[in-house]
Amino acid sequence: MRRDTALRGPRKSSAPLIFFALLFLGAVGVSVLAGRLNWLVGIAYAVLSLISFTTYAFDKSAANRDAWRTPESTLHLLSLAGGWPGALIAQQVLRHKSKKIAFLVVFWATVLINCAALLWLHTDGGRAAMASFLAIS
């Protein structure tokens, strides 16, 4: 494995995926500002994306050093919870977990599930459920 790949930055073909992740985060921000989503949802996406990116960076570093690795299930759980934009950016910028087909199939499944849940939060039932959850918490 080449250890200098992270120094060269993202591949040119990765720009659309990075743009997609940033566009998604922007859309979440607009939904929060428009009052369609609770502000906690926007904060959660931003924080989980940052945690995901950082976790991918640590895992890439560990892979280069043959050290303890972050389990793939942890990476997938972070994506499912809402950190997938940061994970997608990390995959492209760090060139980590961007070619392993089995990993990517599960990753994109977590993205679809997460987006479906976010769309549900935009419905009356989803907003009511979120309000009820926040009232209990």
Image (cartoon, rainbow, N blue to C red):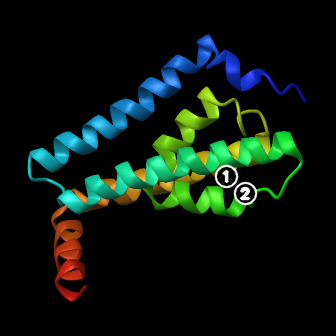
Could you tell me if the residues under marks 2 and 1 are in contact, i.e. CB atoms within 8 Å?
yes
Q: Specify few, some or many for label 1: CA neighbours under 10 Å numbering under 14, 14-19, or 20 or more.
A: some
82 in relation to 136, above or below: above
SS type, badge 1 = helix
Q: What residue type is labelled 2?
A: Glu
Q: On the image, which quarter does residue 72 sit in?
A: bottom right
Q: Distance between the residues labelled 2 and 1?
A: 10 Å
Q: Residue 87 location, x and y as percent?
A: 56, 43
**Mark positioned earlier in the residue sequence (2 or 1):** 2
Q: Which residue in the structure is indicated by mark 2? A: 72
Q: What residue type is labelled 1?
A: Val
Quarter that holds the C terminus: bottom left
Q: Which residue in the structure is indicated by mark 1? A: 106
Q: In this view, does 2 lie to the left or right of 16?
A: right
Q: Residue 50 location, x and y as percent?
A: 46, 47
Q: Is residue 75 left or right of residue 32?
A: right
In the image, 76 versus 94, the foreground residue is 94
In the image, 113 versus 50, the foreground residue is 50
Q: Specify few, some or many for label 2: CA neighbours under 10 Å numbering under 14, 14-19, or 20 or more.
A: some
SS type, badge 2 = helix
Q: Residue at position x 34%, y 58% from top?
A: 44
